Image: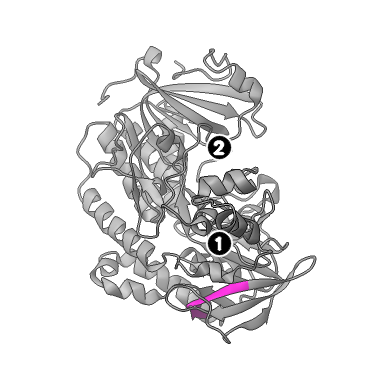
């Protein structure tokens, strides 16, 4: 493992992809340990999706009020600023890494800028993947109406734009993000009549010792619960939104009770008026860069694919580490611990006292959480034949059903070829899991694609040529 200052010709000691909690913790810890680091991120500022910043023009004076654990972020940001000033870390903002190749060490290729107007290559001896996750969406009639947003999207609107998606907002889906989003929205003045959780929180009771070992998580849950109680928000278990109503915009939703497999129970539907719906069914690790290289994955208890790592955050590929949501969704506390742990491993140093145990307790809680909120197999019972599943290509559940029943498609790939489901702008990130479920057949594999983000053809045409003077392949001395 690299333990000495980097050779400029060899590039950085460590390149961290992603400046959210895991990536930030990894970069500053690695710099503390004497490594020369590059911190690449698609955003203009650090923090990732979790510590999202208000737009500068809004003049927000107390952004911490919109975040949980903001002091941890400011402490990490201060350490990063000190390391940047000392020349130990280069923060490469608005760098969208689209592929990585092994060339002695690693060579990362990125587009640069909000419009991908430039390109860059970054060379490093080791790479840490901390790219986070994106939301899993399960379709239902009306989910494409204006006013229907994701739970994470509602939080993003509030944190970055200081706006609400509506005044009376229903939250629905599954997972702890719903409670966090509801707590933020009511705190900002929204009326939230209902939070509909499709699963049952009793799943946490199957292993009571696991949540008891992470009191911080229990305290966080209590804070959210107190906020909902204070604002008289009803929390309904085993309940889902099975239809959103409206023409130009959502005006109401139908809620229905679910059985254990998430099938709507007949006669339980009831309509609630609202002008916005925030919905989400958990998060999916963003691991395309690693799977395209052949890194091993594992199936998490909620059916998602995550990178397989060892006790020191090593993936199956030499020189490639991973931390945070890429290893299985578990929240900011776990991401911070894993980022720090990975930095010690890359530096060839023993971790700080207690760090390994803390990571193990938080990871165990993450696995229990994933199992408790795993989507049930009966959710397609919400769909009608005219329900859009792939919103980019406007492919309905009926067309997917025809591909399976009439044309003999037996897997998601064949459905894609027959219907164009998943071939639009998002390349299946929104609809991929739903299409795979409706296609039946063997379980779909982890997401893998040669280009992790859209790349201009002109930059692809110059692939293999030096990136030019804009941003070099290694640290500047």
Residue at x 70%, y 67% (from the top left corner): 166
Horizontal side of residue 410 vs 320, given as left or right:
right
Residue 70 visible from this viewpoint: no
Q: Which mark is residue 42?
A: 2
Residue at x 68%, y 74% (from the top left corner): 168
- Image quadrant occupied by the N terminus: top left
How many marks on residues? 2
Say few, some or many: other residues with alpha carbon within 10 Å of mark 1 (under 14 / 14 to 19 / 20 or more). Answer: many
Horizontal side of residue 117 vs 178, given as left or right:
right
Picture quadrant where residue 33 is located: top left
Residue 226 visible from this viewpoint: yes
Whole-number angstrom distance, CA of label 2 to CA of label 1: 26 Å
Q: Among all residues in the image, which is located at the extreme bottom?
A: 267
Q: Secondary structure at mark 2?
A: loop
Residue at x 61%, y 21% (from the top left corner): 459
Mark closest to the chain's N terminus, 2 or 1? 2
Is residue 384 shown above or below 160? below
| Residue bearing mark 1 | 138
Image location of residue 179, percent across then percent down: 49, 69
Horizontal side of residue 94 vs 203, given as left or right:
right
Image location of residue 446, percent across then percent down: 42, 45
Is residue 326 shown above or below 365? above
Residue at x 65%, y 27% (from the top left corner): 456
Q: Is 68 part of what is drawn in magenta?
A: no
For the residues bearing labels 2 and 1, Cβ distance under 8 angstroms: no
Colour setup of the view: one colour
Instruction: Tell me the magenta residue range.
Output: 235-242
Image location of residue 93, percent across then percent down: 55, 33
Nearer to us of marks 2 and 1 is 1
Towards the viewer: 76 or 209: 209
- Image quadrant occupied by the C terminus: top left
């Amino acid at each position: 493992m690299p333990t000495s200052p980097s050779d400029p010709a060899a590039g950085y000691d460590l390149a961290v992809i992603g400046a959210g909690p895991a990536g930030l913790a990894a970069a500053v810890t690695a710099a503390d340990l004497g490594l020369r680091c590059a911190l690449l991120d698609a955003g203009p500022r650090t923090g990732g999706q979790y510590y999202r910043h208000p737009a500068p023009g809004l003049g927000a004076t107390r952004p911490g009020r919109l975040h949980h654990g903001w002091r941890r972020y400011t402490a990490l940001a201060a350490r990063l600023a000190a390391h940047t000033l000392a020349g130990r870390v280069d923060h490469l903002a608005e760098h969208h890494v689209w592929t990585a190749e092994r060339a002695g060490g690693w060579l990362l290729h990125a587009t640069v800028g909000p419009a991908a107007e430039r390109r860059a290559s970054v060379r490093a001896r080791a790479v840490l993947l901390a790219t986070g996750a994106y939301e899993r969406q399960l379709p239902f009639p009306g989910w494409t109406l204006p006013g229907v947003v994701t739970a994470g999207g509602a939080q993003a609107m509030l944190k970055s734009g200081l706006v609400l998606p509506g005044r009376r907002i229903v939250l629905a889906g599954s997972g702890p993000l719903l409670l966090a989003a509801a707590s933020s929205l009511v705190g900002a003045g929204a009326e939230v009549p209902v939070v509909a959780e499709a699963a049952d929180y009793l799943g946490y009771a199957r292993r009571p010792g696991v949540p008891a070992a992470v009191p911080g998580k229990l305290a966080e849950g209590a804070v959210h619960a107190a906020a909902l109680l204070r604002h008289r928000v009803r929390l309904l278990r085993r309940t889902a939104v099975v239809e959103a109503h409206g023409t130009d915009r959502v005006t109401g939703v139908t809620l229905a009770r679910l059985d254990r497999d998430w099938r709507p129970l007949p006669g339980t539907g009831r309509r609630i008026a609202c002008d916005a719906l925030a919905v989400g069914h958990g998060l999916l690790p963003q691991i395309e860069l690693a799977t395209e290289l052949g890194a091993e994955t594992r199936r998490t208890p909620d059916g998602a694919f995550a990178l397989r790592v060892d006790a020191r955050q090593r993936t199956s590929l030499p020189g490639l580490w991973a931390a945070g949501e890429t290893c299985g969704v578990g929240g900011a506390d776990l991401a911070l611990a894993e980022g720090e742990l990975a930095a010690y491993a890359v530096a060839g140093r023993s971790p700080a006292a207690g760090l390994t145990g803390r990571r193990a307790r938080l990871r165990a809680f993450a696995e229990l959480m994933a199992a408790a909120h795993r989507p049930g197999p009966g959710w397609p019972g919400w769909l009608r034949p005219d329900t859009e599943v792939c919103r980019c290509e406007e492919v309905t559940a009926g067309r997917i059903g025809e591909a399976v029943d009439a044309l003999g498609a037996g897997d998601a790939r064949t459905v894609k070829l027959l219907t164009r489901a998943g071939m639009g702008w998002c390349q299946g990130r929104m609809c991929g899991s739903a299409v795979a479920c409706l296609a039946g057949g063997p379980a779909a594999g982890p997401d893998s694609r040669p280009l992790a983000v859209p790349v201009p053809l002109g930059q692809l045409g110059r692939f293999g040529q030096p990136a030019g003077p804009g941003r070099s392949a290694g640290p500047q001395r």
